[in-house]
Each structure stands twice: as structure tokens, then as C-alpha cells.
Image: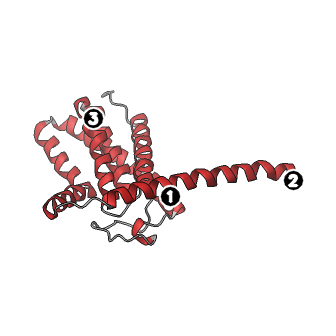
Amino acid sequence: MDVTETEPNARIATAFAAITGRVVALDMAFFRLLAAVNLPKSVAYFLILLVRSGDGWIWALIACALWLFLPFAEMERVVLHCILAFAISLAIYFPVKFLGRRLRPYEKGLPIKPLVPPLDKFSFPSGHTMNNLAVALTLAAHFPVLFLPAIAIPILLGALRVFFGVHFLSDIIGGGVLGAFAFTLAKAFFPLSGS
């Protein structure tokens, strides 16, 4: 192999290592910032309950509300579209999660005990952020008034998962980007018009 062929690869590897190092440094700084916050127990318990709503059961309640307030055909269309977004999100999530194999903060020697249980072994991307954002954006596509909460709530729940020791900030950002991508794919496969 010619030296000139390996030189671009070495530059790419060096650049990737530098970017990765910066991301890790930012992750650690943000994590330490949140870890320094000491909340009263009553607030912490409320936030734990809130973050656990991101485990997915909240979507069943929303589907029931849709069933109560929408004509059946419209409710069925919205729910099927959300299920498609969730399925696409999961199809992206599992390969990325298990190829990356990023350890969670409490597994990296940080003095933190997770306050909420992780649903799987690895940290990147945040499946809570990814899946909730994909579904919430899909719901907002049908009901545009929900657009801002559809973005804010999954990101807030993701940030709380950083606070509770099971994710890094870049896990949340990565989950957000991938969740938006899953929504975009679901929207392409499932146009919003009834035709």
C-alpha cells in the first residue's frame, strides 16, 4: 500500500478522534454540572415520575384520548402513523445502539448511582428521546398546535435522564436527530392527506 493512500485515512482518523474527544469533554462537563444540582426529595420524586412517563405507557393514554375525541377513521390513521414512526425509530435504534456500545455514565467510573432504571445496557443514542420524539412529531404533524410541546417534552425527558445518571448529553442530541429522521421517514411513507 502506498504511503499517500494511507495519509488521508490517518487525517480522517485524527480528525474523528479530535471531534470525539471534544464531544466526550462536553458530555463530562454537562454531566458534572447536572450532578452538582441537589434537589429536594419531593422534587426529585416528581421528576422521576415525569421521566418514567417517557417509558412509552403515556402513548397508550394519548391513543385512548384520541379514541374518545376523534372520529374512528381519523383516530385510526393517526395511531397507525405513530406506530409506523415508532417502528422506524426502533429499526434505526437497535443497530446504532449495539454497534456503538457506549457505556452509561455510571459504568464509566463516575460517582453516580442511576436514579431511574435504564431499559438496556448501552447509552447512545437515547431511545427515550429518539422514540418519543419520532412519535410526538408524528402526532404534531396531524395536530400542528402540538409542535412545540412535541419537541420540548422528549428533549426535557432526555435531559432528565442525563440528570438521573443514565445518559450523556450527546446521547440525547443523537437520539433527537435520529428521532427526527425516523419521523421524516414515517412521513414520507405515510402521507398526511387522506388520499
Amino acid found under the numbered disc labelled 3: Leu
Amino acid found under the numbered disc labelled 1: Pro
SS of the residue at dot 1? helix
Residue 95 appears in the figure: yes
Contact, mark 3 vs mark 2 (Cβ under 8 Å): no
Q: Is residue 108 above or below residue 61?
A: below
SS of the residue at dot 3? helix
Label 3, label 2: how far apart the Cα atoms are: 52 Å
| Residue wearing tag 3 | 148
Q: Earlier in the sequence, mark 1 or mark 2?
A: 2
| Residue wearing tag 2 | 3
Question: In this orientation, which residue lies closer to the viewer: 166 or 178?
Answer: 166
| Residue wearing tag 1 | 95
Locate residue 63, reporting x and y percent: 19, 46
Residue 77 appears in the figure: no
Contact, mark 1 vs mark 3 (Cβ under 8 Å): no
Label 1, label 3: how far apart the Cα atoms are: 29 Å
